[in-house]
Image: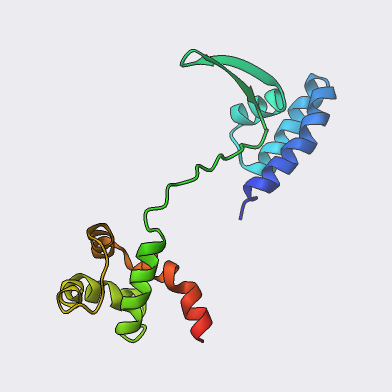
Amino acid sequence: MGLTMSERKAVTRQTFSRYQKACKKEKGKILDEFIELTYYSRKYASWILTTWGKKKYCLIDGQLVKLVAGSRKKRKRKAKARIYGEEVFKALRKVWYIFDCPCGKLLVPVLQTMLTILYKFEEVEFDEEVHQKLQRISSATADRLLKKEKENSA
């Protein structure tokens, strides 16, 4: 069983400083140890140990980008626009109570068939946009929206 990626990075960080200070003969021995430990190919291992922590600038699509070998990638999370707002939640909760609080997997097929009937007999009243959203809601999303309600009723 090999090392995890975080363990490989830690080993690389430790080996890098020794590798940079060593002479040519010692570098070969260090490289052999490193390959045995990480299971990298010899060419890739030597490249990693020579470029670790070095900054390199390159042009990508006309923008200057800084690349650092061994640095962590920062993920940028984009805030997604909410598809199902408060009105949809209230309508879903009302229909959920009407059908005796089933899970999302059972509720969504019932929603798709019975929603127009409930609307026709004036059990529920909401605008066309909410009706459309309730027709296409997934069971996982319904469970996620109703999670707080389920915890409060338990």
For this view, does 46 lie left or right of residue 21? left
For this view, does 153 lie left or right of residue 96? right
Quarter of the image where one finds residue 71: top right
* Residue under the image location 62 percent in, 51 percent down: 2
Query: Whole-percent x and y of residue 58?
Result: 57, 15
Pick whichever, 111 or 53, lies toward us.
111
For this view, does 15 lie left or right of residue 87? right
Locate the N terminus by quadrant. Answer: bottom right
* Residue under the image location 47 percent in, 73 percent down: 147
Query: Whole-percent x and y of residue 38?
Result: 65, 42
Report the label total. Answer: 0
* Residue under the image location 72 percent in, 37 percent down: 12
Work out whether 107 lies above or below 72.
below
Quarter of the image where one finds residue 106: bottom left
For this view, does 94 lie left or right of residue 6? left
Query: Whole-percent x and y of residue 91?
Result: 33, 70
Work out whether 142 lies above or below 49.
below
Query: Whole-percent x and y of residue 72?
Result: 65, 37
Pick whichever, 52 or 89, lies toward us.
89
Pick whichever, 93 or 7, lies toward us.
93
Work out whether 105 lies above or below 63.
below
User: Which coloring applies here?
Assistant: rainbow
* Residue under the image location 23 percent in, 79 percent down: 123
Pick whichever, 73 or 13, lies toward us.
73
